[in-house]
Amino acid sequence: MSRTNGTTGNNIQIRNKIAEYQQKIQNARNKTSNLSGQIEEYSRCIQKVQEEIIQYQEQIRQLEQRIEGLRQALEKVKDMKRKFDDNYRRRKGKTEAVLNYTRHPVIPTRYCNGMKSLLVGKEFERANRGFDNSQTMIKRRVEELLQEIENLKQRIRECENRINEYQYHINLANQTISGLNGEISGYENTIRTLRMQLQ
């Protein structure tokens, strides 16, 4: 009778131990499930940030195209300015040649005064100033767009830092899950051993 009671008491202890390890397994599986949910959430965050990066890269590409167009326009303005200056020098040379050529400078002088008015008068100044203003405006706009590109690159760097942070948490969660799976395996082995001890 006493052996039966002893065996029964031992079996109860073993079953209690088994129930304890089963609860540990359940707790570990709950933690694993929660961590898996976190990994999925971090993965979604990474995907969202990657989409942001793609948008910023597209904006940079468009800005670079605009800058290239502005630089081409600047070269055209410079070319027009060179032609304008060459034309100015030719006209000035012709005017001076007329003055030097004639023996009666009265008529040529009037002609030259008229030409000088065109060459160095308000129209000339307005045209000359227009070239300079155009170049200044284009250069300023290019600088503004370059700054916009730099701002977008900074945002991309911030996005990459966020991705690295999310990836760090994913790696940490995977390591924790791996450890929990090891614990679960150990608990299951212990339960099998305990069940073999049941009489």
Image (cartoon, helix red, strand yellow):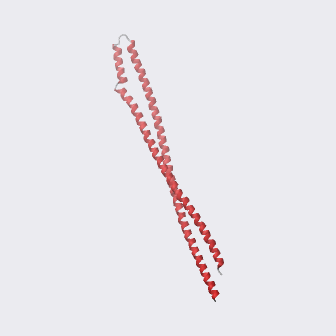
Q: Where residue 65 sits: x, y (%)? A: 49, 41
Outermost residue, top side: 103
Q: Viewer-proximal residue, 24 or 155?
A: 24
Which image quarter holds the C terminus?
Answer: bottom right
Where 27 sits versus 88, above or below?
A: below
Where 144 sits versus 191, above or below?
A: above
Q: Is residue 100 left or right of residue 170?
A: left
Where 163 sits versus 110, above or below?
A: below
Visible residue check, residue 51? no
Which image quarter holds the N terminus?
Answer: bottom right
Q: Quadrant of residue 13?
A: bottom right
**What residue is at 36 percent from the left and 21 percent from the top?**
116
Q: Is residue 126 left or right of residue 56?
A: left
Outermost residue, bottom side: 1
Q: Report the label total.
A: 0
Q: Where residue 55 sits: x, y (%)? A: 49, 49
**What residue is at 50 percent from the left and 52 percent from the top?**
161
Q: Viewer-proximal residue, 121 or 147?
A: 147
**What residue is at 62 percent from the left and 73 percent from the top?**
190
Q: Where residue 152 sits: x, y (%)? A: 46, 47
Q: Is residue 5 left or right of residue 106?
A: right
Visible residue check, residue 80? yes
Q: Viewer-proximal residue, 180 or 110?
A: 180
Q: Quadrant of residue 123?
A: top left
Q: Where residue 174 sits: x, y (%)? A: 57, 61
Q: Viewer-proximal residue, 92 or 53?
A: 53
